[in-house]
Image (spheres, grey):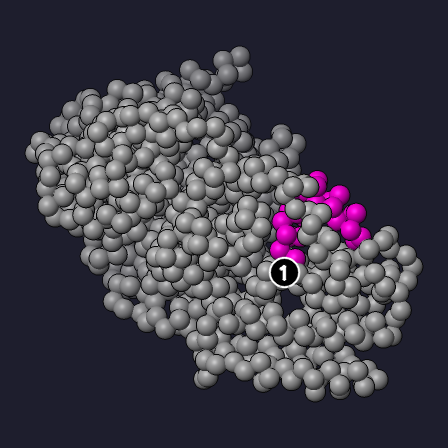
């Protein structure tokens, strides 16, 4: 396909103008011209045409259509004297992407009257009729100035304006009246724009490294480029990157990098618009794979095409973000500075100038390469500094090649790097700045390889490097006094931690081997040990950090996928941990790691699981791993604790004990005393007429609802109850089944809720009644949930896998299910188990983005582990069929 675009092919202006003016109804002609022009632009785009040409030519096409439309409107509708059509905003910049807003201002010399209002309405209606989606306003000169004076966005839009049609004298008057000598002086304009950028960054959590980034608004995106141009125009009176080069604000290399990055983002944005058929500036999963293919990327072993595209995107915005920082700091010095500069000497290599760090000589890094790391330690030790001067940032970037093998072996460099980790504060900010300037990835090549690396799943919403730095931030946050209320246990542990720098190193290194193929924990363990030894850590400390990297998933996996009420599970985990020091560090790393994957992954339920595992393991370590658990004594202690916490005024001790006699010992081990007390109080006086009994309570500390159901045993009971939860749109996180000697079954459920869930007593009573009603009238179609599957899930197919093994105790089997998350999952699984004549003991639901990795404890109908080959085959194939091939309804 041709990558050239001839304007006459796009629109033969004179031929079109003559035909449109002569036509009784010109609308079809306009539609055809616009459609043909956009088709050619799309072909040009798909053929690899230059993005700058595409944007410019699209702007030209719309300009010419508007000129003819204006001519027709003026001919047919008088009343346009003293009026002009002005392009504003992005259209005013002549940067019109396929479905960008076409923002127009009908500028009047005087106040609007009936004629001008009618003219404006006719023109805008005509433009919409021909297929142009315009945003418009009608204002006279005085109104424009008044609104611009009060609104930063308005004055910015008008700064970018250009004349299209009508009275040519009005636009220069407008430009003169909104100039910095009249409104929005340069200092005020820059300060407000800078604050606006900081606010915009905060909306994206100060990172652009999201799975579905916003190409326009995100940090490092197109808005950052526009920010530079706006300030340039306000300061110099003219916009353009070339202006910055000529005035010494931008080097030739930076100029080329800026244009290259802008053109990549322009092409990406155009691809999004063409694919969506509308204005779409979010790089959604819906389009990522197709755009990667369009850009020529191919899947490689261990490196998907979409991951290659996103890595280029993330590295592009990182570069743009840094150029934005350099240029805005130049502007700060030029615009905001008053009086003489104040310089303070720090050492023979650095000084501060007006609160910014600067090298004393442009040859400092050439003569003393270790200063490339020393600079960051100085920043960390002097938090009052505003940052690094723009010219010094440039020198850092120009000298990155000096960070080579010899540099990494230099004792001064390794000492400086470790001093950064040992310093009492500022570690997160320092590491982020090192990463932004390219120093961290150059010094640690293993880190450099994961910069911008996407993790193509819904569990990790950040790139690997961004995730690693978030984890370090979370670890440091535990140690900050004002944040102690967030995670009291973590803050207490870290305040007494020996050599916390080891934990911070583990946080930085724990995912450093991702993307290489193989087990990243095992590969990372080797990298971590080598890096630590290279930095002169003792063999014990190096192995300690390497152990944390190797086992950073162990505690999360155990808490979420094992029955942590089982003493054998606790003893096995305690044996793997070994001692309290390893347990403390692993707990902190685990909490920080889960919280660093996504703002939405952490919840209080996961926090409680980790806390329970930590507490049980600490007790096991205190008692000694060789000390056998006395189950009878443990149950007696639990019963005593339950009796103590139950309301004493209404306690029927004999009734409670009678109820307990019907329960197996396993019930007391697998439930905490508070839950046992609640169950006992709610169920011990149950009447046959009330069966099934359903009770619910709100657990504020877990942000969850706790349900208990007492009903006669039936093979269909669990599936029916799970279906009832689905019909109420409630998602089960934990389920347990306990049989009573009386032939009844106690089902215990935990349902996670959000802040909008009603938890008043009356609402909970209504919920319990509704659940009971649905249990009594089960719906055979509950598996076909009416809940909408989230859009993003559709782009991450996860084939269902079922694996079954006998628990070491020999009492039951463990079934692990890996599949795509979906509504009604537990009901479907329960149905499959019924079809294979299998009993469910408990279910633990763990969601990791688009995947669920659920654990089910099951037995055959003789209460024994499932070992029969035919029955195992039935389970595995039936559940896969129900989940992946729902049309197969019969077993």
Quadrant position of the C terminus in the picture: bottom left
In this rendering, is residue 805 above or below 591? below
Residue located at (92% from left, 59% from top): 114
| Residue 624 belongs to the span the image colors magenta | no
Residue located at (81% from left, 85% from top): 23
Residue 790 at x, y percent in the picture? 52, 56
Q: Is residue 22 left or right of residue 30?
A: right
Q: Residue furthest left?
A: 539
Q: How many numbered marks, from 0 up?
A: 1
Query: Residue 618's image quarter?
Result: top left
Residue under numbered circle 1: 92
Label 1 crowding class (10 Å Cα cut-off): few <14, some 14-19, many 20+?
Answer: many
Q: Is residue 573 visible?
A: no
Residue 589 at x, y percent in the picture? 28, 35
Residue stretch rendered in magenta on the structure: 139-161
Q: Is residue 269 visible?
A: yes
Query: Residue 428's image quarter?
Result: top left
Quadrant position of the N terminus in the picture: bottom left
In this rendering, is residue 579 above or below 861? above
Residue located at (21% from left, 29% from top): 348
In this rendering, is residue 36 above or below 551? below
Q: Residue furthest top?
A: 649
> Front-most of 303 and 839?
303
Residue 519 at x, y percent in the picture? 20, 53
Q: Is residue 65 left or right of residue 873?
A: right
Residue 806 at x, y percent in the picture? 23, 50
């Amino acid at each position: 396909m041709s990558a050239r675009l001839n304007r006459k092919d796009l629109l033969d202006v004179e031929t079109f103008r003559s035909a449109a003016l002569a036509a009784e109804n010109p609308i079809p002609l306009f539609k055809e011209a616009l459609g043909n022009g956009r088709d050619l632009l799309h072909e040009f785009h798909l053929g690899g045409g230059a993005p700058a040409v595409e944007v410019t030519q699209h702007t030209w096409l719309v300009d010419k259509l508007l000129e003819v439309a204006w001519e027709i409107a003026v001919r047919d509708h008088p009343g346009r004297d003293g009026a002009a059509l002005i392009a504003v905003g992005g259209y005013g910049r002549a940067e019109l992407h396929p479905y960008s807003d076409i923002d127009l201002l009908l500028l009047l010399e005087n106040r609007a009257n009936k004629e001008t209002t009618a003219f404006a309405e006719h023109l805008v209606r005509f433009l919409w009729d021909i297929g142009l989606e315009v945003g418009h306003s009608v204002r006279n000169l005085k109104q424009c100035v008044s609104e611009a004076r009060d609104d930063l966005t308005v004055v910015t839009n008008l700064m970018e304006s250009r004349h299209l049609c009508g009275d040519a004298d009005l636009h220069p008057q407008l430009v003169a009246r909104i100039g910095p000598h009249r409104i929005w002086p340069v200092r005020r304009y820059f300060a407000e724009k800078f604050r606006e950028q900081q606010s915009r960054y905060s909306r994206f959590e100060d990172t652009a490294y999201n799975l579905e980034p916003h190409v326009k608004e995100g940090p490092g995106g197109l808005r950052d480029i526009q920010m530079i141009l706006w300030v340039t125009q306000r300061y110099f009176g003219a916009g353009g990157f070339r202006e910055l080069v000529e005035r010494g604000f931008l080097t030739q290399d930076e100029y080329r990098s800026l244009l290259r990055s802008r053109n990549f983002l322009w092409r990406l944005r155009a691809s999004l618009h063409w694919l969506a058929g509308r204005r779409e500036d979010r790089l959604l999963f819906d389009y990522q794979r197709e755009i990667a293919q369009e850009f020529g990327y191919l899947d490689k072993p261990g490196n998907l095409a979409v991951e290659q595209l996103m890595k280029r995107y993330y590295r592009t915005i990182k570069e743009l973000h840094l150029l934005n920082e350099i240029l805005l700091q130049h502007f700060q010095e030029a615009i905001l500075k008053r009086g003489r500069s104040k310089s303070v000497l720090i050492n023979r290599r650095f000084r501060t100038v007006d609160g910014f760090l600067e090298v004393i000589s442009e040859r400092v890094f050439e003569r003393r390469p270790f200063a490339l790391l020393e600079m960051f330690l100085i920043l960390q030790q002097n938090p009052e500094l505003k940052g690094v001067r723009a010219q010094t940032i440039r020198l850092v970037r120009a000298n990155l090649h000096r960070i080579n093998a010899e540099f990494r072996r230099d004792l001064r460099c390794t000492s400086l790097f470790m001093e950064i980790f040992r310093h009492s504060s500022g570690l997160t900010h320092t590491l982020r700045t090192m990463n932004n300037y390219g120093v961290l990835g150059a010094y640690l090549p293993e880190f450099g390889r994961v910069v911008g690396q996407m993790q193509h799943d819904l569990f990790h919403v950040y790139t690997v490097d961004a995730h690693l730095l978030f984890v370090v931030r979370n670890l440091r946050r535990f140690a900050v006094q004002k944040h102690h209320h967030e995670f009291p246990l973590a803050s207490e542990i870290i305040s007494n931690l020996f050599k916390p720098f080891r934990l911070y190193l583990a946080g930085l290194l724990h995912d450093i081997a991702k993307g290489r193929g193989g087990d990243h924990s095992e590969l990372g363990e080797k990298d971590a040990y080598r890096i630590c030894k290279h930095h002169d850590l003792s063999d014990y400390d190096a192995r300690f950090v390497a152990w944390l990297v190797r086992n950073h998933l162990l505690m999360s996996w155990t808490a979420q996928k094992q029955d942590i009420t089982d003493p054998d599970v606790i003893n096995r985990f305690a044996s793997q941990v070994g001692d309290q020091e390893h347990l403390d560090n692993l707990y902190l790393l685990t909490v920080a790691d889960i919280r660093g994957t996504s703002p939405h992954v952490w919840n209080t339920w996961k926090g409680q699981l980790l806390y329970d595992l930590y507490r049980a393991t600490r007790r096991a370590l205190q008692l000694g791993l060789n000390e056998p658990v006395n189950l009878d004594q443990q149950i007696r202690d639990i019963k005593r604790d339950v009796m103590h916490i139950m309301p004493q005024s209404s306690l029927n001790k004999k009734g409670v004990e009678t109820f307990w006699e019907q329960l197996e010992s396993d019930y007391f081990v697998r439930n905490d005393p508070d839950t046992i007390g609640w169950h006992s109080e709610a169920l011990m006086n149950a009447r046959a007429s009330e069966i099934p009994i359903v009770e619910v309570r709100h657990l504020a500390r877990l942000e969850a609802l706790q349900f208990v159901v007492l009903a006669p045993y039936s093979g269909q009971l669990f599936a029916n109850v799970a279906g009832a939860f689905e019909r109420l749109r409630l998602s089960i996180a934990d389920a347990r089944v306990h049989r009573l000697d009386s032939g009844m079954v106690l089902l215990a459920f935990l349902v996670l809720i959000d802040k909008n869930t009603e938890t008043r007593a009356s609402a909970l009573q209504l919920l319990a009644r509704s659940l009971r009603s649905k249990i009594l009238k089960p719906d055979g179609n509950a598996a076909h949930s009416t809940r909408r599957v989230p859009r993003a899930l559709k782009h991450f197919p996860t084939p269902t896998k079922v694996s079954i093994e006998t628990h070491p105790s020999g009492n039951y089997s463990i079934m692990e299910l890996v599949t795509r998350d979906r509504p009604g999952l537990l009901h479907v699984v329960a149905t499959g188990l019924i079809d294979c004549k299998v009993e469910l003991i408990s279910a633990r639901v763990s969601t990791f983005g688009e995947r669920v990795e659920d654990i089910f404890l099951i037995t055959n109908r003789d209460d024994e582990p499932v070992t029969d080959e035919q029955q195992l085959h039935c389970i595995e194939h039936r559940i896969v069929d129900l989940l992946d091939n729902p049309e197969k309804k019969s077993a």
